[in-house]
Amino acid sequence: MIEFLKDNWWTIAIVLNYILAIIAVTTILFKSINPTKTLTYIIVLLVFPFFGLIVYYFFGQEYRKNKIFNRKDVLNNKLIKSINENLKIDPESIAKHETNADEDQIRLIQLLQKNDKSPLTKYNQVEIIINGENKFEKLFKDIESAKQHIHIEYYILKDDKIGTKFLDLLCQKAKEGVKVRLSFDDVGSKISSKMKSKMKNSKIEFHAFMPVLFPRFTGKMNYRNHRKIVIIDGEIGYVGGINVSDTYVNYPENKKYWRDTHLRIEGEAVFSLQTQFLTNWNFVSESTLRLDRSFFPQNKIKTVEHVQIAASGPDTDWANIMEAIFFAIVTAEDYVYITTPYFIPNDQIITAMQVASKSGVDVRLLIPDKSDSWTAKHATNSYLEQLLKANIKVYRYQKGFIHAKTMVVDDIFTTIGTCNMDYRSFNINFEINALIYNKDKTKEAKAMFIKDLENADQIDFKRWQNRSNFLIIQEAYCRLWAPLL
């Protein structure tokens, strides 16, 4: 028997591989997965022995139904229910303050309220922040003024120049008696043992989100917390695309200019950010945090700026942010301006953009000229011809790397947050966006987009069609992997 195994080990291994692959394929077919994604997994499993099983093990497990963690403990809490009920307002009330508000805008609000219990908040003061250096200047001042608690959740947190300044400030506030709770993604972040020891000694409570054994080699390991949230005393909130790392700050010594967008929010929408943080905190800390009214203080803001917080991830029943983006595009009447660093969309978003453009809507897409990922760059390029054929204007940012994740629609709606226009953000990662229903803020975001176009080149359709066959082959190869990127 042993001799037989020795002489036929390779055949046995191949047979075993395909038995497992067939089981995996059968499992995939019984799930309601996007056909493109299904086909990708089947090809990988059947064409690449052993490697296909590894890819499926790490990337193919679907947890949306099984729930990596349960949100009900937080969402069913009496205090949360009471606050959400008090925040809840009739979506039609937005029309009283926004003269351009229409039925479609109201339906978008209702979509999120039903999908994710995301209340429309009325009394807010929103500030759009351009670039990391401006964000951290404001953030540090707010942290210095904290009296009760600071809640933080980041995908990338490094103890480099800006990160050390950030963490030292948190240590100082913790020593002053402010309760600091910090969650960081284990794959995206890199914090030294020395800094962790300092944080621990300062009484900062911190936890890594879903730790992995070898984070350096698992850059795309499912499922990652891609959110960037800071809540200070339940009154001030930050959300957007800017992580804590020197990469995101335009220091003179940095070789690459980094263009990004973030939000500073005061008002009722901070309560929604707080709820999302507390949900994640219960998971990473493996305990139930006792909630009290100090997390949700009396709102002092009287300015009317309607804001809704949309969160999505394996913990939600629906792809909330993707559905909101899709609905906003297909109901647009004048224009849709999208900025994203990674454009690897699903069929729904591609179709929505094409239909909007062909119906006369001015659809524009701004992406980086040079990506930080070879695969993502060519996967993105594989979709551009479809857009150009539908008269969608595509621009590539030249000044540096544009990392902002924004969309502006019809002078009445804008969304800014952490969600990229790709499969991973729509279906796998934990993401969070602020949806702003305010014509002044939307016009500000529109002007910001137009300003960015001054540093971008528009793609000429005829020239694009004449790109080399070698590039087209690379694009086709990378597009095959698009559902896994």
Image (cartoon, rainbow, N blue to C red):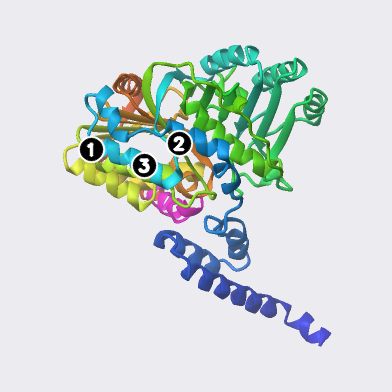
Between residue 219 and residue 374, name the one nearer to us. Answer: 219
Identify which residue is drawn at 53% across, 70% down: 27
Identify which residue is drawn at 40% across, 42% down: 113
Given the image, on which type of amino acid does mark 2 rest?
Glu
- In this view of the protein, can residue 399 be seen by the observer? yes
Given the image, on which type of amino acid does mark 1 rest?
Glu
Sequence-first disc among 1 and 2: 2
How far apart, in angstroms, are the residues tagged by discs 2 and 3?
22 Å
The residue identified by callout 1 is 103
- Asked if residue 299 lies left or right of residue 160, the reply is left
* Classed neighbour count for the residue bearing mark 3: other residues with Cα under 10 Å, few (<14), some (14–19), many (≥20): some
Closer to viewer: mark 1 or mark 3: 1
- In this view of the protein, can residue 379 be seen by the observer? no
Image spot of residue 364 (x, y percent):
29, 33
The residue identified by callout 3 is 324
| Relative vertical location of residue 444 with respect to residue 410 in this rendering, above or below | above
The residue identified by callout 2 is 85
Quadrant of the image for the N terminus? bottom right
